[in-house]
């Protein structure tokens, strides 16, 4: 199907990026200088057909928004949770979206008339975070997503580091406390059990729409449970930062995900934990970990932007066919 698509010199200029999450789709379109010239958000649908209609419908909606047509679209990048076979445009085990196995590229390229590149959502967000943070094109950085779960993406020399099977960056499931709470993965005391929004909400177990915010507020008022959970949150995230720097020597760790909306309360807390954990270690102190972390601005479309940038890179199979 890829060979029937227009070439990259066809005059089509617009690069579209979609971030498909469990509740919403964030879609952006980029102009010539990677600047965002249009953005729409819509609730996400469920199941194979829902995801396909999200992709096609979001592109239509974006084009209406900026007064252009699908014929102007050069590429579409899609960031989506779950395991992604990027070379074949296939999504596997996107449980929150009700997708078990979906050939997303093959089933949307015909309707859109443009190549559709699919990428794991955290890896797409990593590329977007690198662009938003002004990381050099050949630089190294990690993006630590503190959301319902915890995962990171790593860029080395300007490229996403995937490892042998795509597991690189799954720092949420590094166990750091053998006596800790049981994690959804079956281990005990994973980093995610300390600083994942889902695990914190379960451990807090009190009513409220924003449990992590409630934990920080209650900790400020001296609540014992909240003080314990807050310390775990900051030290858990600090452990993830240490793992990323000590294993990949990234220069910067950008923090994003739902918990990033806590802003400086989160950033300052993690910085303090990094300093405290390094107090007795000249080695750790020499790494200046607290100075290497920064926060992605709230509401910035890192994942959609990153998906648009990923979408503009020809997939390996296409290279093999044409080059
Ligand atoms: Zn785990």
Image: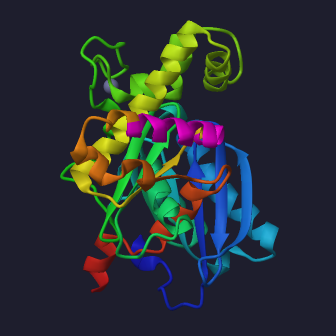
Picture coordinates of residue 315, whole percent (x, y): 36, 70
Q: Is residue 282 visible?
A: yes
| 121 is higher (above) or lower (below) than 320 | above
Instruction: Give the residues in magenta.
Output: 260-275
Residue name at image x 31 percent, y 38 percent = 278
Quadrant in which the N terminus is drawn = bottom left
Side of 129 relative to 73 (left or right)? left
| Nearest the eye: 14 or 216 | 216
- Which of the 4 image quadrants contains residue 188? top left
Picture coordinates of residue 193, whole percent (x, y): 41, 22
Side of 58 relative to 81 (left or right)? right
Q: Is residue 202 visible?
A: no
Residue name at image x 45 percent, y 69 percent = 135
| Ligand 1 sits in quadrant | top left
Picture coordinates of residue 92, whole percent (x, y): 38, 42
Side of 320 relative to 17 (left or right)? left
Picture coordinates of residue 309, whole percent (x, y): 50, 70
| Nearest the eye: 279 or 15 | 279
User: For residue 266: magenta?
Assistant: yes
Quadrant in which the C terminus is drawn = bottom left
Total tally of numbered discs in the picture:
0
| Nearest the eye: 122 or 275 | 275
- Which of the 4 image quadrants contains residue 316? bottom left
Residue name at image x 66 percent, y 69 percent = 29
Q: Looking at this rendering, what residue extends furthest in the left direction?
A: 164
User: For residue 306: magenta?
Assistant: no
Q: Which color scheme does this rendered protein use? A: rainbow
Q: Main secondary structure of the magenta part?
A: helix
| 151 is higher (above) or lower (below) than 118 | above
């Amino acid at each position: 199907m890829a060979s029937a698509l227009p070439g990259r010199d066809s005059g089509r200029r617009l690069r579209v990026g979609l971030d498909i999450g469990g509740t919403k789709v964030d879609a952006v379109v980029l102009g010539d200088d990677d600047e965002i010239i249009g953005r729409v958000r819509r609730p996400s649908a469920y199941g194979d057909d829902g995801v396909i209609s999200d992709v096609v419908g979001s592109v239509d909606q974006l084009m209406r928004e900026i007064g252009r047509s699908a014929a102007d679209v050069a590429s579409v990048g899609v960031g989506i949770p779950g395991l992604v076979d990027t070379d074949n445009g296939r999504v596997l085990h996107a449980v929150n979206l009700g997708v078990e196995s979906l050939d997303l590229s093959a089933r949307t390229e015909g309707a859109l008339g443009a190549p559709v590149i699919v990428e794991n959502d955290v890896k797409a967000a990593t590329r977007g975070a690198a662009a938003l943070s002004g990381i050099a094109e050949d630089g190294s950085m990690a993006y630590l997503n503190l959301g319902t779960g915890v995962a990171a993406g790593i860029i080395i020399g300007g490229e996403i580091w995937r490892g042998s099977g795509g597991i690189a960056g799954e720092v949420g499931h590094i166990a750091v406390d053998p006596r800790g709470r049981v994690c959804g993965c079956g281990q005990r005391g994973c980093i995610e059990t300390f600083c994942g929004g889902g695990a914190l909400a379960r451990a807090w177990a009190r009513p409220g729409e924003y449990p992590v915010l409630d934990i920080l507020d209650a900790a400020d008022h001296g609540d014992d449970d909240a003080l314990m959970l807050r310390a775990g949150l900051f030290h858990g995230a600090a452990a993830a930062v240490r793992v990323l720097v000590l294993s990949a020597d990234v220069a910067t760790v950008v923090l994003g995900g739902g918990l990033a909306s806590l802003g400086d309360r989160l950033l300052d807390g993690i910085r303090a934990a990094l300093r405290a954990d390094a107090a007795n270690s000249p080695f750790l102190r020499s790494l200046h970990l607290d100075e290497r972390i920064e926060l992605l601005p709230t509401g910035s479309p890192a994942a959609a932007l990153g998906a648009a940038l990923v979408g503009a890179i020809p997939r390996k199979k296409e290279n093999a066919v044409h080059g």
